[in-house]
Image (spheres, coloured by chain):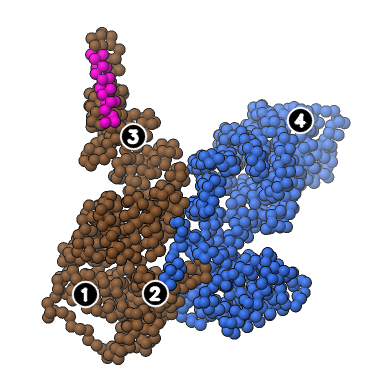
Chain colours: A brown, B blue
């Protein structure tokens, strides 16, 4: 049952979604000691109120800073008259609260008047409602009623909190709770205002920032917020940049945070690693994750991202080690399940992989990545209908998931429906306009539909935005070749070859030989024998084109002999048409426009 | 313990990667409203005899109550009370017993329900509608866990007391929860608004149409809702929910159950209504993504597997693009569908593809009769009557345009009619009748056209759902009504025309898909009227509007206006362009009309000799295509030309040929024109005769003029009336009939003062 408990405890705090980021504030990290003091005091405040996730975040950050000398430690918080009055009730209630007996906790707090007690009172009621809602979901009368189950406590809480709010009686924590209630009631605009207010009242409470970050949807909105001028704001802004996929800005922010003295923070490290993962800088990301695991070997968060990287690099032993390690730590975590799924997928045991992704989804149905990954597994298993289903679910969770749209497109492509899949590829392309993979896929579909003009446009665009797989040009060249546009085809092959050699990586050679073979023939036809023989010689470097290269060389020398002999002829028939109409030298690229 | 917990907690419910929409396999569940219905059924089956009238009314209520969305107790009791107050009281009493008693009272109620298995004689027998419902409810009730039963009881109490909170106040049905705390407006308003709307809807509309619901629907209710709305969209769009309301409802449904794929399809249909390509494509693809899944369940191979839905998915996509006029896209999608269907040997699907293929070709404007013929043959071979007769109808349409003989077309239509009645294809019967109307009108047989239109309009619908209702709002009806309006306009019955148009406007509101038909028809009639009255400034703005709806027609009308305004050169160039275009698209009717207008242009420049060959060509074309109305009009033109060329005997001879059909079928305007022309010919001939004969001939002419005047005054066509009066006065003068002459002269003077404009040519 431990994973259930886990899911319950994660529910305790309403917000544990990473990500946010904004504005350009100058860093104010004059005094790391001061920051540390602030952190220590906020940790104790949050602890008293049962806000475990904020405690965790603040503690991690505090741990990364140097320890304070004894005389610098902040004094224990002083008691007001009210606090003293409520002390016993609060202690009792907190113990019930920790045992998840929320109603009981709320009952004993109902008469208390201190701010702390009030927050715990309201928070217990909120959590009690959430818990009941979850229980209800299991017990609802039917599937259609499921969406109908809601936290009945929310309305009452909102009424009480809004009264206090307009009277100005809410402290930072209570404001945060008020915001959460508003968000749960889908009153997003009001919620944003309240969260901003909460950050002003208590800047150090990370939970409020995190909630805010979920509600900010674009950069304009972020700029319009008036946020407190505090060092924690930079963390928020960096987080926000990561969420909004403004990776470059995010990396800059994190870099300056590191320079300001947070170099040991595992939180920052993981964020940077995720950012690198998002821009597909695999080596950097891998290095950071490895370092992270050294410092924090029992960490489970973000390990699914790590496993994705290992998967892409096909690093089987490392992935295997990671999977086994995580299972030992906690096998009922979403991240663990995803890692194991990736592990099985890499070993081509797709049934098992799908099983683990399913398990991840059972742990958290809104886990987007798992839906898409499961779709991929079903694709591998040729279970197209299940794959379509999985991708559709992913899209339902997040309409902007380009991988799911792309996956759907691939599925239909496999089902030989090139026109049908166009729609999906187009969707994916809309979401990632500069991703060559979608463009190549679009181009292939158009090519299958004999829409050559569109196909050419797609391939060329794919090349222009930076082709990852270096296939676009080759495909473009082949398309030109098919359409007998030999000049254009030759141009493409030339750029392709240049591209391949300039990037230096060892890719599939078979295709280079194709290009060389075609170029050789092309030059030969246009009577540019020097270039042709060069290409033919290069052909001989490749096994599959060696014979043809040799044959071409023979042909060239034959023709050369003939022309030499024919020049002695007074009326040499070849002399007049020795100039090709449009000659293309290997270095002349300027004229190329597809 | 752990395993039980797990099995319930696991969400989504998956086996083999398939998420089941229905967690517990229950299509229906017990709600307080359902308990009320059960109570009603219980009362009806057990209690003392109810009066026959009331029982009948109650019986009619059962199905809507079972299938409709949950009503509040107020609404429910009100509906029952309208049928039988006594039963309503009994039901209320029973509910009161339960709600004000204890949990055991509810349990007792379920225990005492007549078990459908034992009650063989009663209406609640296991296979009856009522019995089935009761069995569902009992099953659902028995499956409830302890806490669920308690929850249900609580809900019942609330349901009952919310009614009791404001017993008199029917207008504001606020639930108690919201009513007792006025501070919570923001969150509770939504619910109230929904409910109030529902109320209003219910007060105005009959019970089964108040389909705007608030809470979640059970699967049964949702299915019923979707089926009904889809049917209405197809057959009677006005009765369906408004597009936005329907979309809201669907979104609501999908929020509660995203796996309910059919809702996506309805959303597709709904967004087609408002021509929203974005949402319609999205919904269509989403629907098939879902369908592919459910199709693969169990029967994964052969015809019934998901391969089948793949084919139809592509086909539907083609249809979608076709409707939006994206012919190239449609073509690609169609080819895809055909290829997949061929690969899996699905002949039925292939037939559907073929029928779309020829439709597409036709829409693109190319000749597709060979394809259509093939389609008909193949469809007949595979016993697909719908496709067969659809193909034949399409062939008939093409044949009519290409000038096939009438008896061939009518024979073909008769054959399809036999097919329709045999298979009760009521939709196609409507289309067939509308098509006959159009064909008769094209041939210029107004009486036959009118008769067919009336036949269609007076026919009772054969659809099961709308049984007995006379008119649906399908395209066929719109076409027939438009023809009717135009026919009436031809006879100068403008009062009737405006009534028909008003009806059309009601039946097909401007945003619906067939509205363009009557818009064009309305504009044409107004344009013709303005032209006849000589109010060219009124006609001009109509040209723009017509051009927006139909480009060819717009150009033609523009030429007419330009001609009337004496801007001859412009008119001529437009006509030339139009003629070329129409010859390319084989639009014969328009070609003839263009020729006639061109001939009229020649008249203006006194080029009567040049007009002759044009008119003869037009006549030949009209005869070849059996277009009688146009042929008669051409003859009128021909006669006038001849008159002007100074051969009135010839002109009169030609005119006599056309006189009969014009008087029988023609428009009032044509009748008047023909008679006026006849009179002029007679006058011209009289000039050459001797005195005695001359008097008789002039007398004949006077008579013709009198008739023509009667026709023109019917249309209130003042210009022509003035000319007639002038001629009459001259004739009377020649004949020495002074009083008549003076009267006509006065009439002429009056009209002339009114018009204050130089006269126009007489035909």
* Residue B467 in picture, x, y percent from top left: 71, 57
Chain to which the residue tagged by mark 3 belongs: A
Chain to which the residue tagged by mark 2 belongs: A
* Residue A216 in picture, x, y percent from top left: 34, 65
Quadrant in the picture for residue B698:
top right
Instruction: Report the front residue among B152 and B588.
Output: B152
The answer to whether tags 4 and 2 share a subunit is no
Query: Is residue B324 visible in the rendered structure shown here?
Result: no
Cα distance, mark 4 to mark 1? Answer: 109 Å
Find disc 1 in the rendering and name its residue.
A39
Cα distance, mark 3 to mark 2? Answer: 59 Å
Q: Name above or below for residue B685 compared with residue B9.
A: above
Chain to which the residue tagged by mark 1 belongs: A
Cα distance, mark 4 to mark 2? Answer: 90 Å
- Where disc 3 sits, the SS reads helix
Q: Residue at x 35, y 34 (%)?
A: A478
Find disc 2 in the rendering and name its residue.
A181
Mark linked to residue A477: 3
Q: Name above or below for residue B152 compared with residue B758.
A: below
* Residue B508 in picture, x, y percent from top left: 63, 55
Query: Is residue A73 visible in the rendered structure shown here?
Result: yes
Instruction: Report the front residue among B627 and B214.
Output: B214
Instruction: Report the front residue among B566 and B324.
Output: B324
Q: Looking at this rendering, what residue extends furthest in the top direction?
A: A570
């Amino acid at each position: 049952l431990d994973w259930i408990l886990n899911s319950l405890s994660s529910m305790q705090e309403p917000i544990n979604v990473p990500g946010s980021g904004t504005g350009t504030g100058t860093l104010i990290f004059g005094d790391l000691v001061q920051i540390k003091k602030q952190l220590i005091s906020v940790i104790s405040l949050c602890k008293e109120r049962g806000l475990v996730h904020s405690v965790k975040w603040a503690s991690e950050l505090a741990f990364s800073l140097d320890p304070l000398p004894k005389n610098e430690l902040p004094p224990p918080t002083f008691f007001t008259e009210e606090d003293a009055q409520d002390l016993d009730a609060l202690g009792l209630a907190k113990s019930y609260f920790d045992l998840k007996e929320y109603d009981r906790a709320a009952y004993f707090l109902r008469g208390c008047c201190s701010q702390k007690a009030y927050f715990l009172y309201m928070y217990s009621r909120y959590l009690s409602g959430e818990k009941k809602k979850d229980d209800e979901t299991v017990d609802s009368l039917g599937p259609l009623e499921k969406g109908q189950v809601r936290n009945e406590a929310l309305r009452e809480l909102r009424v009480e909190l809004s009264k206090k709010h307009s009277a100005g009686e809410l402290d930072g924590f209570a404001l945060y709770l008020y915001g959460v209630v508003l968000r749960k009631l889908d009153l997003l605009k009001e919620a944003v205002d309240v969260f901003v207010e909460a950050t002003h009242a208590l800047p150090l409470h990370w939970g409020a920032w995190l909630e805010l970050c979920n509600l900010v949807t674009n950069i304009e909105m972020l700029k319009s917020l008036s946020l407190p001028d505090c060092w924690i704001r930079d963390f928020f802004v960096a987080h926000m940049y990561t969420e909004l996929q403004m990776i470059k800005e995010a990396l800059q922010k994190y870099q300056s945070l590191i320079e300001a003295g947070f170099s040991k923070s595992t939180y920052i490290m993981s964020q940077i690693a995720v950012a690198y993962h998002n821009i597909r800088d695999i080596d950097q990301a891998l290095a950071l994750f490895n370092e992270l695991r050294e410092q924090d070997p029992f960490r489970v968060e973000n390990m699914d991202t790590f496993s994705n990287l290992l998967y892409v690099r096909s690093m089987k032993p490392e992935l295997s080690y990671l999977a086994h390690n995580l299972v030992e730590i906690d096998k009922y975590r979403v991240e663990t399940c995803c890692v194991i799924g990736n592990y099985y997928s890499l070993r081509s045991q797709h049934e098992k992989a799908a099983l683990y992704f399913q398990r991840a989804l059972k742990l958290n149905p809104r886990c987007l990545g798992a839906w898409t990954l499961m779709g991929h597994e079903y694709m591998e298993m040729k279970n197209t209908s299940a794959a379509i289903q999985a991708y559709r679910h992913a899209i339902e969770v997040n309409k902007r998931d380009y991988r799911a749209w792309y996956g759907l497109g691939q599925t239909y492509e496999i089902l030989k429906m090139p026109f049908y899949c166009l729609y999906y590829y187009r969707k994916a392309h809309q979401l990632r306009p500069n991703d060559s993979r979608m463009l190549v896929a679009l181009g292939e579909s158009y090519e299958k539909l004999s829409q050559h003009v569109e196909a050419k446009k797609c391939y060329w665009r794919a090349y222009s935005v930076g082709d990852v797989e270096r296939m676009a040009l080759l495909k473009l060249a082949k398309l030109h070749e098919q359409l007998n546009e030999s000049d254009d085809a030759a141009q493409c092959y030339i750029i392709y070859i240049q591209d391949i050699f300039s990037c230096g990586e060892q890719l599939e050679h078979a295709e280079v030989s194709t290009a060389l073979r075609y170029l050789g023939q092309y030059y030969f036809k246009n009577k540019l024998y020097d270039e042709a023989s060069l290409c033919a010689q290069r052909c001989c470097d490749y096994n599959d084109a060696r014979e043809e290269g040799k044959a071409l060389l023979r042909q060239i020398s034959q023709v050369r002999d003939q022309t030499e002999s024919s020049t002695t002829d007074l009326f040499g028939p070849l002399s007049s048409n020795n100039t090709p109409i449009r000659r293309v030298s290997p270095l002349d690229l300027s004229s190329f426009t597809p | 313990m752990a395993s039980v917990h797990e099995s319930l907690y696991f969400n989504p419910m998956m086996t083999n990667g398939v998420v089941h929409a229905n967690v517990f396999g229950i299509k229906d569940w017990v709600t307080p409203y359902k308990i009320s219905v059960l109570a009603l059924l219980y009362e009806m089956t057990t209690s003392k005899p109810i009066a026959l009238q009331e029982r009948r009314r109650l019986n009619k209520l059962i199905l809507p109550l079972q299938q409709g969305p949950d009503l509040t107790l107020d609404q429910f009791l009100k509906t029952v009370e309208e049928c039988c107050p006594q039963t309503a009281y009994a039901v209320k009493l029973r509910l009161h017993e339960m709600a004000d008693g204890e949990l055991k009272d509810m349990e007792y109620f379920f225990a005492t329900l007549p078990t459908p298995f034992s009650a063989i004689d009663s209406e609640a027998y296991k296979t009856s509608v009522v019995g089935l419902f009761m069995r569902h409810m009992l099953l659902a009730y028995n499956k409830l866990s302890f806490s669920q039963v308690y929850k249900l009881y609580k809900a019942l109490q609330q349901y009952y007391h919310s009614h009791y909170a404001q017993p008199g106040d029917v207008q504001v049905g606020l639930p108690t929860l919201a009513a007792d705390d006025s501070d919570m407006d923001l969150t509770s308003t939504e619910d109230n608004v929904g409910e109030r709307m529902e109320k209003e809807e219910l007060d105005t509309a009959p019970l089964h149409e108040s389909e705007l619901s608030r809470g979640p629907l059970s699967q049964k209710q949702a299915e019923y809702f979707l089926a009904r709305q889809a049917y209405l969209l197809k057959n009677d769009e006005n009765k369906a929910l408004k597009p936005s309301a329907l979309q809201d409802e669907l979104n609501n449904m999908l929020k509660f159950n995203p796996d309910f794929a059919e809702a996506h399809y309805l959303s597709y249909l709904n967004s087609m209504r408002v021509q929203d390509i974005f949402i319609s494509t999205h919904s269509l693809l989403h629907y098939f993504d879902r369908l592919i899944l459910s199709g693969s369940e169990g029967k994964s191979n052969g015809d019934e597997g998901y391969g089948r839905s793949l084919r139809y998915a592509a086909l539907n996509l083609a249809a979608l693009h076709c409707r939006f006029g994206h012919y190239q896209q449609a073509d690609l999608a169609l080819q895809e569908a055909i290829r997949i269907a061929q690969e899996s040997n699905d002949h039925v699907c292939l037939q559907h593809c073929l029928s779309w293929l020829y439709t597409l070709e036709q829409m693109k404007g190319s000749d597709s009769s060979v394809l259509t013929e093939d389609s008909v043959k193949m469809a007949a071979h595979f016993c697909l009557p719908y496709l067969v007769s659809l193909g034949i109808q399409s062939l008939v349409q093409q044949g009519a345009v290409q000038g096939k003989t009438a008896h061939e077309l009518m024979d073909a239509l008769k054959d399809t009619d036999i097919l329709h009645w045999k298979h009760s294809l009521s939709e196609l019967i409507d289309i067939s009748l509308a098509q006959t109307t159009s064909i008769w009108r094209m041939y210029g047989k107004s009486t036959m056209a009118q008769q067919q239109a009336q036949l269609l309009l007076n026919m009772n619908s054969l659809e099961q759902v709308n049984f007995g209702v006379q008119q649906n709002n399908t395209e066929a009806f719109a076409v027939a009504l438009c023809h009717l309006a135009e026919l009436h306009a031809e006879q100068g019955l403008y009062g009737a025309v405006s009534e028909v148009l008003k009806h059309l406007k009601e039946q097909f509101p401007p945003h619906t898909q067939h509205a363009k038909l009557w818009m064009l028809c309305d504009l044409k009639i107004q344009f013709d009227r303005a032209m006849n009255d000589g109010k060219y400034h009124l006609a001009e703005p109509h040209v723009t509007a017509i051009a927006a709806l139909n480009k060819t027609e717009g150009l033609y009308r523009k030429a007419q206006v330009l001609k009337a305004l004496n801007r001859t050169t412009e008119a001529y160039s437009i006509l030339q362009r139009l003629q070329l275009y129409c010859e390319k698209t084989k639009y014969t009717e328009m070609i003839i009309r263009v020729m006639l207008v061109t001939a009229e242009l020649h008249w203006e420049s006194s080029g009567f000799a040049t007009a002759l060959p044009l008119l003869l060509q037009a006549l030949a074309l009209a005869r070849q295509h059996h277009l009688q109305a146009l042929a008669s009009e051409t003859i009128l033109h021909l006669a006038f030309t001849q008159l002007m060329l100074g051969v009135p005997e010839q002109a009169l001879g030609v005119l006599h040929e056309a006189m009969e059909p014009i008087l029988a079928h023609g428009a009032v305007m044509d009748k008047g024109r023909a008679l006026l022309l006849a009179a002029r010919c007679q006058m011209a001939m009289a000039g050459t005769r001797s005195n005695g004969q001359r008097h008789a001939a002039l007398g004949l002419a006077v008579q013709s003029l009198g008739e023509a005047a009667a026709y023109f005054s019917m249309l209130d066509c003042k210009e022509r009336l003035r000319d007639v009066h002038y001629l009459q006065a001259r004739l009377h003068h020649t004949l020495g009939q002074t009083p008549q002459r003076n009267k006509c002269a006065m009439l002429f003077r009056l009209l002339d003062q009114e018009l204050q404009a130089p006269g126009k040519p007489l035909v």
